[in-house]
């Protein structure tokens, strides 16, 4: 049995790996190998595989033979570039970067210039004739090593740098001379000694070993785990380590470094996009420490380099058939590509790029649809600043991620999380963000930074999260100590409201009105492809004409859940509902219901009119009656006065109606059975509305849904009276209405007797919220007390009220489908909980053979795309 290979070399036009090996080499390593094989100018190096990282965590150290493989590959590197690692006069210097199989920008750690020491920095200065460059490289190594490998605070090094610039009365790092940089190296080393009790390691091999260890450790840092949790990335993939020959963008005015995208990552426009800094190293661009210039300027500054870079742009995009995010360095007039990866993009850009690439013949429609994650579409549905609003634009920065956000200003990630947890909407304001801020960024409505460019950490992560983001806003002076930022004479403190316009890059003082976005032609094209590709129907949960219209415009194929109880909470209706509940005899109750009936009829009429020609599933009253009764002392007094009874009497009635466990109590069909006049009023309202619309020329398709059925006799009893009430109305109007009577399947007993229930039901709609609640025995109102712990400790993979628990609740759903259709093969079946807008749950519903899902209006596009994904994946699996 052969020894496992852990290290893969690339260089001089030939690599041991390729793009298909991303699980083993990570995305970065696989693409470095692929580019090498394509003849792209890539500095030589080697990749330590993800298997080594997995072994490191499983066994607490390197696998056997890894050290020897690393040594052999260093020798190969020395041969490839003609320099020796550790040489005092002409040292081979290395960079070490992480690279997981799934891109995690800004989440993992990088160290540059490994191999420099007090001795070799002198040799480097002599060989290059550039002492400033040599010591600039050395101080970067010491700083990165202290931060990444030794775990020291980045800000402490930055403080020393800021003090040095202040003492020299300069603004930019590039204005410091070699003497200043030598002093910084000494001060950085002294800081390391003071904080860690150890010396900075002078030995190149020790530097490399410790850095590789640090990259492996960084896989499980809190920020990396947070990023993976946010993006549903598995925790057991491990990271590869890329060790690469250093090329230097900080050797002078003919050197530089940059990041570029083959298309605009914010808009999707097919235009070369990026930015760079001269006389800088790569971290300067992505860390946002200096504000870079646009890539178009490179055409003027270095036309030959620009033409070469533009040709590589075309070659890589055509080869990978997707928008690429490339990092490059120019060393003394020679171009090198340090990495390429699939570029993170906004939802708007993702849609445009996918549609354009189909038009350009690069990809087909199925690939285009699979390129867009359903959750990304949420970004397209974010609000924008109302163009009619009068705004006080305080400052302007770079428009890094579109949309708009209003919130209270906070200056730390911790505060963002803390305030968001108590229901506050916040805007995170930072000098610049770092990977440690990811949790706070996710909790914020928007992100604002004073520094950085369109490829800074804030910009990339903000775009990936779909957060409105403005970066490089040099107009604001952020004081994180005082928790404020200043623009001219205006001071904005913690808790003050601002508005961000991520489309224009504007910072607006105070709250601003926002409006819903309009869909682009590209979006409509993509959704048209999705509708054609999917099998599963998509309906909406809506109980107002407005929501119904929004959903229909988004492509809803009907209403899967119209909650009639929501109509009872109107200011003009609630007193009448309360009067009905408090009635002590049937006649009094009927008098109140007679007042409600015309109101209900108008509600149904408007909804049915909006949804003409499409089915509308109307759920009869479901919640327990006590939900409609007053709770506070003030409300008690108002209600008692309106109804005309003493407050004490009202309190006694409310107390009598109180239930120990109302979700399992007197609600749903149980109400309709004990108080049949309630359901009779609702059915009368539905059918009068339907008959009147039919007379007006509308085709309406009501589907009456009886909730909380657990026994077939409950359904028989209720259905018989429902049909009788409907028939009376249709006879009175001399009109026949096309309608169905079905039930929600939300009680576990209904699932196991679904074959019996299907004898009476014309359709099933799984109420996945209540089915989850009753299956787990979780109260969805109280689960917040322990769910975070369950998720953190891995007891549950995800919130079962967000994503269907396929191993438990999912098996009940599958059982209900099988049993129901054993009785009635053409039984219409869907789901109507909010799970209908969750992509993983939609795919489950497709596989289980449901006919439709139903979700809130703004989740309709997500559900349609998720349904298309499910159909395409099924087709691909069978081909």
Image (spheres, rainbow, N blue to C red):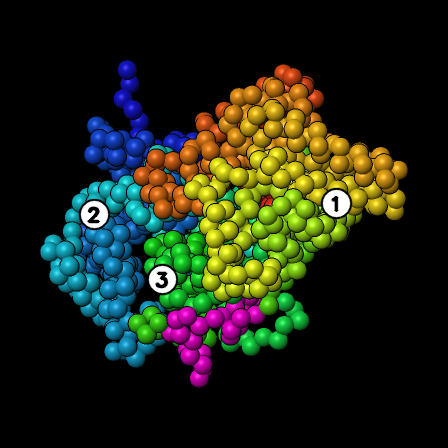
**Residue 415 shows which numbered tag?**
3
Asked if residue 809 is positioned above or below residue 245 in the image, the reply reads above
Closest to the camera, between mark 2 and mark 3, is 3
Q: Residues within 10 Å of mark 2 (few under 14, many from 20)?
A: many
Residue 111 coordinates in the image, percent (x, y): 29, 51
The magenta segment is 484-512
Occupied quadrant, residue 795: top left
Determine crowd level at label 1: few under 14, some 14-19, many 20+ residues with C-alpha closer than 10 A: many
Above/below status of 765 relative to 650: above
- Residue 303 in the image: above or below residue 762: below
Q: In the image shown, does 260 or 150 lie closer to the viewer?
A: 150
In the drawing, does residue 318 fall left or right of residue 783?
Answer: right
Q: What residue lies at 21% left-to-right and 42% top-to-bottom? A: 209
Point out the tag, 2 or 3, that comes first from the N-terminus.
2
Of the residues tagged 1 and 3, which is closer to the observer? 1
Residue 346 in view: no
**Residue 161 seen:** yes
In what element is the residue under mark 2? helix
Find the distance from the CA under tag 1 to the CA under tag 2.
78 Å
Residue placed under numbered mark 2 in the picture = 207
Under circle 3, the secondary element is helix
The answer to whether residue 621 is left or right of residue 169 is right
In this view of the protein, which residue sits in the foreground, 79 or 849?
849
Task: Look at the image and tell me in which quarter the C terminus lies.
Answer: top right
Q: Residue at x 62, y 39 (%)?
A: 675
Within the magenta stretch, is there residue 856?
no
Which residue appears farthest toward the bottom when viewing the image?
489
């Amino acid at each position: 049995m052969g020894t496992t290979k852990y290290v893969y070399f690339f260089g001089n036009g030939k690599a041991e790996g390729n793009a298909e090996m991303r699980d083993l080499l990570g995305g970065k390593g696989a693409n470095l190998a692929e580019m090498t094989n394509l003849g792209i100018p890539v500095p030589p190096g080697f990749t330590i595989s993800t298997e080594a990282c997995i072994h490191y965590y499983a066994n607490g150290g390197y696998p056997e033979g890894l050290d020897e493989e690393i040594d052999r590959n260093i020798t190969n590197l020395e041969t490839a570039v003609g320099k020796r690692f550790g040489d005092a006069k002409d040292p081979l210097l290395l960079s070490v970067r992480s690279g997981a199989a799934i891109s995690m920008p800004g989440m993992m750690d990088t160290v540059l210039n490994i191999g420099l020491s007090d001795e070799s920095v002198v040799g480097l200065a002599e060989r290059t004739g550039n002492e400033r460059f040599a010591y600039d490289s050395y101080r970067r190594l010491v700083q990165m090593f202290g931060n990444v490998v030794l775990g020291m605070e980045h800000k402490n090094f930055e403080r020393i740098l800021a003090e040095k610039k202040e003492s020299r009365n300069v603004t930019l790092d590039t204005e410091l001379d070699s003497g200043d940089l030598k002093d910084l190296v000494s001060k950085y080393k002294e800081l390391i000694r003071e904080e860690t009790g150890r010396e900075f390691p002078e030995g190149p091999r020790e530097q490399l070993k410790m850095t590789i260890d640090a990259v492996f450790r960084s896989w499980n840092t809190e920020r990396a785990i947070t990023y993976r949790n946010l993006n549903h990335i598995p925790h057991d993939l491990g990271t590869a380590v890329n060790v690469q020959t250093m090329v230097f963008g900080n050797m002078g005015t003919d050197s530089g470094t940059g990041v570029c995208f083959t298309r605009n990552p914010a808009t999707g426009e097919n235009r070369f996009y990026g930015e760079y800094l001269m006389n800088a190293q790569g971290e300067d661009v992505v860390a946002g420490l200096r504000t870079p210039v646009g890539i178009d300027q490179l055409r003027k500054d270095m036309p030959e380099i620009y033409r070469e870079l533009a040709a590589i742009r075309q070659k890589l995009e055509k080869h990978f058939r997707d928008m690429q995010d490339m990092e490059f360095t120019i060393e003394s007039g020679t171009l090198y590509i340090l990495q390429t990866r699939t570029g993170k993009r906004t939802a708007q850009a993702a849609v445009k790029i996918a549609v354009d690439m189909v038009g350009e013949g690069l990809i087909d429609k199925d690939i285009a649809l699979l390129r867009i994650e359903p959750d990304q579409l949420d970004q397209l549905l974010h609000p924008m600043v109302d163009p009619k609003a009068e705004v006080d634009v305080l400052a302007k920065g770079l428009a890094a991620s579109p949309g708009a956000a209003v919130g209270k200003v906070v200056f730390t990630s911790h505060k963002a999380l803390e305030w968001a947890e108590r229901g506050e909407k916040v805007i995170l304001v930072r000098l610049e963000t770092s990977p440690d801020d990811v949790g706070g960024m996710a909790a914020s409505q928007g992100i604002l930074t004073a520094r950085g460019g369109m490829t800074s950490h804030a910009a990339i992560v903000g775009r990936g999260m779909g957060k409105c983001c403005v970066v490089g806003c040099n107009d604001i002076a952020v004081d994180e100590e005082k928790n404020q930022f200043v623009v001219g004479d205006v001071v904005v403190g913690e808790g003050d409201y601002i508005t961000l316009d991520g489309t224009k890059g504007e910072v607006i003082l105070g709250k601003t009105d926002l409006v819903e976005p309009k869909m682009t032609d590209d979006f409509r094209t993509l959704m048209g492809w999705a509708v054609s590709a999917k099998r599963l129907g998509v309906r909406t949960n809506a109980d107002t004409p407005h929501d119904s219209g929004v959903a229909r415009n988004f492509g809803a194929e009907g209403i899967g859940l119209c909650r009639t109880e929501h109509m009872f909470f109107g200011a003009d209706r609630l007193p009448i509902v309360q009067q009905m509940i408090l009635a002590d005899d049937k006649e009094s109750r009927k008098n109140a219901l007679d007042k409600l009936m015309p109101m209900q009829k108008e509600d149904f009429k408007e909804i049915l009119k909006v949804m003409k020609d499409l089915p509308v599933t109307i759920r009869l009253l479901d919640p327990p009656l006590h939900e409609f009764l007053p709770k506070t002392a003030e409300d008690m007094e108002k209600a008692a006065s309106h109804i005309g009874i003493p407050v004490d009497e009202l309190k006694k009635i409310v107390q009598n109606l109180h239930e120990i466990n109302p979700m399992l109590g007197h609600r749903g069909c149980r109400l309709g059975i004990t108080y049949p006049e309630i359901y009779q009023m609702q059915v009368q309202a539905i059918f009068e509305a339907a008959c009147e619309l039919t007379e007006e020329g509308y085709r309406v398709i009501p589907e009456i849904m009886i909730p909380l059925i657990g026994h077939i006799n409950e359904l028989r009893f209720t259905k018989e009276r429902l049909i009788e009430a409907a028939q009376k109305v249709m006879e009175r109007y001399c009109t026949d209405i096309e309608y169905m009577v079905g039930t929600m399947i939300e009680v576990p007993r209904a699932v196991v007797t679904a074959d019996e229930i299907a004898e009476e039901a014309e359709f099933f709609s799984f109420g996945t919220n209540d089915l989850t609640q009753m299956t787990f025995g979780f109260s969805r109102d109280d689960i917040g007390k322990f769910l975070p712990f369950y998720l953190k400790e891995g007891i549950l993979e995800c919130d079962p009220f967000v994503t269907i628990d396929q191993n438990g609740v999912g098996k009940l759903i599958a059982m209900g489908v099988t049993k129901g259709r054993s009785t009635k093969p053409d039984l219409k079946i869907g789901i109507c909980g909010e799970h209908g807008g969750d992509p993983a749950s939609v795919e489950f519903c497709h596989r289980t053979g449901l006919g439709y899902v139903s979700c809130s209006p703004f989740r309709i596009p997500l559900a349609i795309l998720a349904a298309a994904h499910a159909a395409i994946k099924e087709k691909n699996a069978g081909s």
